[in-house]
Image (spheres, rainbow, N blue to C red):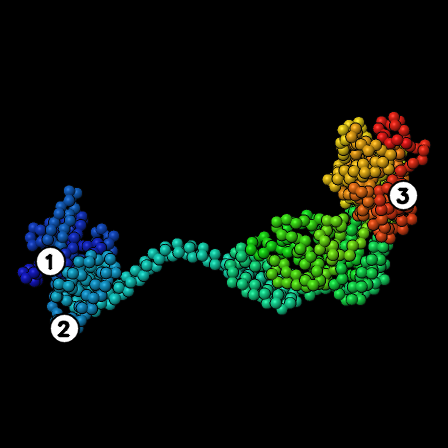
Amino acid sequence: MSLSSEKDGESIEIKEKLPLLPLRDVVAFPHMTLPLLVGRLPSLNAIEEAMASDKVVFVCAQRKPQIGDPGKDDLHRVGTVVRVVQLLRHPDGTMRVLVEGIIRARVRKFSFSHSISYATISTIPDNYEKTLEIEALTRNAVSLFDEYVRLSRKVPEDVTMTLGSMTESDAIANTISSHLAIKVAQKQEILEIEDLNERLNHLVKLLASELEIVRLERKIEGQVKSQVHKNQKEFYLNEQLKAIRKELGHQNEFANEIDELSEAIKKARMPQDVHEKTVKEVDRLGKMAFMSPEATVVRNYIDWLVSLPWEIRTEDNPDIEQVAAILDEDHYGLTKVKERIVEHLAVLKLSKSLKGPILCFVGPPGVGKTSLGKSIARALGRKFVRMSLGGIRDEAEIRGHRRTYIGSLPGRIIQSIRKAGSKNPVFLLDEVDKIGIDFRGDPAAALLEVLDPEQNHTFNDHYLEVDFDLSEVMFITTANILQTIPPALQDRMETTRLPGYLEFEKRAIAKTFLVPKQLKANGLNPDDLEITTSALSSIATSYTKEAGVRNLEREIASIARKVARRKASGNFMKTRVTAKNVEKYLGVPKFISQGVEIRSRVGVATGLAWTEAGGDVLTVEVSILPGKGELFMTGKLGDVMRESGQAALSYARSRASMLGLDRWFYKDVDVHVHLPEGAIPKDGPSAGITMATALVSALTGIPTKQDVAMTGEITLRGNVLAVGGLNEKAVAAKRAGIRTIIIPKMNEKDIAELQPEVRNDLELIPIESMDEVLEIALDKREDKVQQPGKDSSTFLAHH
Ligand code: ADP
C-alpha cells in the first residue's frame, strides 16, 4: 500500500511500511524542518535505507527519553513521516540529519529488529475546511504566539515573521506547536489531535496558559531583579530610616523638652512681659534643629529666665529684738556696729522700703565683715549671697554679656540672685574698694545702678534683656579702706567701721567662737582639746600680726587638725595647749611682740599707719650726716610719703631760728630719713608730722617721748591736716602699748567713734600745728638732751 502526500506542490508517494526513527526528546511536525542527531544502530540503518530510496522515514517520540532500545510500548503511536533533506556523517559513525515533516501518521504496527525497525503506518490527512472559526482561532493563536515569542525570549524572533507570511492554518498550527517551549508529552498531545479546529482550540488554550506562565516568569524575573536593586535600595533606605528615627527620637525628646519648658514657665510666676518673651523664645526653640548651636543658646536663655526667682521671696523676721540677739549670738563685741545694724533694720522695717542708704562695713581683713552680713541674713530669715568685686574691671561682669555667643552668661548680680533663689536676699558685695575701671566700661557705674533704689527695680542685664527687680534685695557692702571707693558709690553708703581687735578681744573671740567652731569642723569634742587663755594670747601676739582674727582662726585650726589626727589614730588623751607648749603645735613664734623702742629716742619718732591690713605702728628714724644738703629717704615709701619728707625738711628750715639752728644748717649736712619694717608698703601723707618730729629731734639732739605716737599731715608752714583711719590707728597704738596719741584737731570728731576700751586707755591730744606736736613729743628735760659728740648724729642746735 502506498500513500500520497502533497508537498511543495509535488506529490510524494508514501510507503505503508517505513524505516522507523524513534526520537528521544522531540516531536516532529509536518511542514517543519528539524535537525536530528542519530547514533543508535537501528536508527542509522533506517536513515541509510531511506537514503537509498526515497529518503523518507517515520519518526515518533519515545515516551521516556532515557530508554536506549525502545520497544513498542515505549513509543507514541502517532508520529510524522519525514524526508531527510540533509545528511552529515560524523567520523564516529553518527549522523546529523535535517528532516522535513511531511504528514502525520498513526502506527498500526511496529516491527523491531536488532539492525533496523519499521513502522507500518496510516497517514492522517490534513484536510480541513477554512471556517471563520478556524481563521479566528488561527489569528488568536498567532497573536498569542507573537506575545509569547516576545516575552519568552526562547523562540527566535524571525519565527513570527515566517508566521506572518503563512496562510495555511494547518501549517501555522504546526509551526507554533513545534516552536513552543513545552514538554515532549504536550507536543505529542497536540500532534495527536486530528481535527484542526480542535487542535487550534487546544493550542490557543495552551498558548494562553503558557503566556501566563511566561508573563509570570517575567514578572518573577523582574521581581528578582528588583530584589537585587531592592537590597541595595533597602540598605540605603534603612540608613535613612535610622537617621530619621534618630531625628524622630530627638523630636520626641525635643517635644518633651518643650513641654517641660512650657510647664516650667507656668510655675515660674514671671512678670507679664517676661512671660511673653519666654513663651516666644520657646516657640522659636521649637522651630530650630534640636542639636543646633543656636538652639543651645536659646535653651540656655530660657533656662535662665525660668530659673530666676521672679516672685519668690522670704518673710522677714519682724522681731527686731530677736535680730539683735542673733547678732550677739554670732559675734563678740562690735557693740557699736551691731547697734548700727539694728537701727538700720528698724528704719527699714518702719519705712517698709529699702530706699535708705546701704550699709558698708569698712575694716581690715578678718574683722568679721562678711560674717556680720551672714548673720544679718540669718537674723532676718533671708537668703544670703556674696559676690566679691575685687578686681572686677569689666562692666559685663556685673551686667552680663549680650547673648551673641554660646558661652555668654548673665552678669554676676543675676547669677547670684539665681543662686540665692529669692528676690530679697541679703546680698553682700565684698571689696567695693577694689573695683576697677578700664576700657571695658566702668563697673562702678553699673554697680551704682544696682545699688540705686531709683533704678534698681528695673535692673537691666545685657544677657537677660528683660528687667529684673532688685529693689527688694538688701545690699551690704564691705571694704578695707574708704579712700578708693568711687565717691558716687560712697554717697550711697552708710559706712560703719570695724577697726580691728585688741588682744583681749581676740582672746575672747577665740574662746567663744573660733575654738568651738574649729573643734566642730575637725570632728573634735570640747573634751578633746583645751586651748588655754594664755595659749590664745600667745597665739594672738606671737603667731599672728593682724587687726582681725583670720590668722588666729587659721592657727587654731592648725592645732585642731593635729589633735584630730592623733585622735583618729587611736591612743588619745585629752590635749591641753598652753602658752608653754604651744610651740609644739605651731612651731617657733613668727613675731616678737612689739614693744615700744627702748634705745635712744633721738632722731626717732613713732607714727601710726593705716594700711589695708589695719592700723600699724611705724617708726621713723632720721640721721644727720655731713654732706651737701641732700635728703635721702629709704624704706618702702610711696611718693606721697617722700613729699611729706620734703615738707618736713622745709618746715625745719623755716623754723631754724626757733629751733636754735643755724639758718644755713642744711648746707653742710645730708638728711637721711628711714622707715624700717618696710615689708608692708606704706604711703599717704599721715606720717608727715612724725617725720618732722624725728627730723627736729635729730637736728636738735632732743629725744622724743617713748610712749607718744602721732599721726597727721604737715604743710610747709607747719599746719597739721586731717588723716584717715584713726580708729584703726588707735587700736594699733593701744596694742603696741602707746599711751598718748597726737592727732590733728580736724580728727577730733572721730574720737567719739573709738571703742571705750581704746578711748579710755589712750590720751588723744588734738593739735593744729607742728609746733604743738614738738611741745608734746619732745622730751626736753635737761638730762635727756644729748650734746653734740655724744651720738654719731651731728647735732646742730646750740643749747
Ligand atoms: P572679713 O569679712 O572682715 O574679712 P570674716 O567675716 O571673714 O572677715 O571673719 C573672719 C573670721 O573671724 C570668721 O570666721 C568670723 O566668724 C570670725 N570673726 C570675726 N569677728 C568676729 C567676732 N566679733 N565674733 C566672732 N567671730 C568673729
Callout 1 secondary element:
strand
- Residue 658 lies, in percent from the top left, at 86, 37
- Name the side, left or right, on which 358 lies relative to 798: left
Residue at (84, 51) in percent of width and height: 750
- Name the side, left or right, on which 418 lies relative to 693: left
- Residue 650 lies, in percent from the top left, at 79, 38
Can residue 384 be seen here? The reply is no
- Residue 698 lies, in percent from the top left, at 84, 33
179 or 20, which lies in front? 179
Residue bearing the label numbered 1: 17
Residue at (67, 55) in percent of width and height: 445
- Name the side, left or right, on which 346 lies relative to 142: right
Residue at (55, 65) in percent of width and height: 283
Can residue 302 be seen here? The reply is yes
- Residue 247 lies, in percent from the top left, at 50, 58
Residue bearing the label numbered 3: 740
The amino acid pointed to by label 2 is: Thr
Residue bearing the label numbered 2: 131
Q: Quadrant of the N terminus?
A: bottom left
The quarter of the displayed image where residue 258 is located: bottom right
